[in-house]
Amino acid sequence: QVQLVESGGGLVQAGGSLRLDCAASRIFSPNTMGWYRQAPGKQREFVAAITTGGTTNYADSVKGRFTISRDDAKNTVYLQMNSLKPEDTAVYYCNARIYRSNGPDDYWGQGTQVTVSS
């Protein structure tokens, strides 16, 4: 089992910045760590991901504004969010996808609220 704990959410004005942290209880390689978000009345959507090798991928809506990174020594993944917009308001969830011989396993954190005021 892998437990994920997010932190760093909060209320910020448009144009501001926040950093989200996701600490994993343990992690196995290879894996992909990612962030997803869900706004009220909408489906959960992909935000950003980073592989064990450091390859990153971003949703078009956050490219150039958000940066995902990881510190494997601390089992932690980060999401630096700059130039925030009201439409970034959502609950942000950390995801760990562990690739096993019989297929991938997905683990989720409990979510952290990000609210961007206009």
Image (spheres, rainbow, N blue to C red):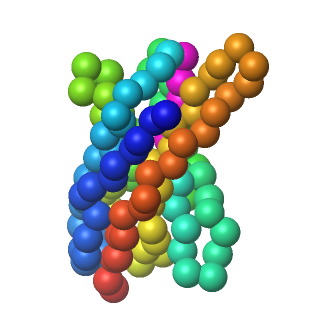
Residue drawn at x 75%, y 19% is 102
Residue 11, image x, y percentages: 25, 76
The reply to whether residue 110 is visible in this rendering is yes
Expressed as whole percent of the image width and height from the top left, the position of residue 87 reads: 48, 75
Q: Confirm whether the magenta stretch covers residue 31.
A: yes
Viewer-nearest residue: 12 or 42: 42
Q: Residue furthest bottom?
A: 118
The one of 15 and 33 positioned closer to us in this rendering: 33
The chief SS type of the magenta part is: strand
The residue positioned 33% from the left and 52% from the top of the image is: 6
In this rendering, position of residue 10 left or right of residue 86: left
> Which stretch is magenta?
30-35
The quarter holding residue 72 reads top left
Which residue is pictured at 53% across the width and 24% down the height?
Answer: 31
Query: Disc count in the image?
Result: 0
Above-or-below relation of 112 to 94: below
Q: Is residue 45 shown above or below 101? A: below
Residue 106 to residue 36: above or below = above
Residue 51, position as x, y percentages in the image: 51, 25
At horizontal 33% and vertical 85% (from top left) the residue drawn is: 118
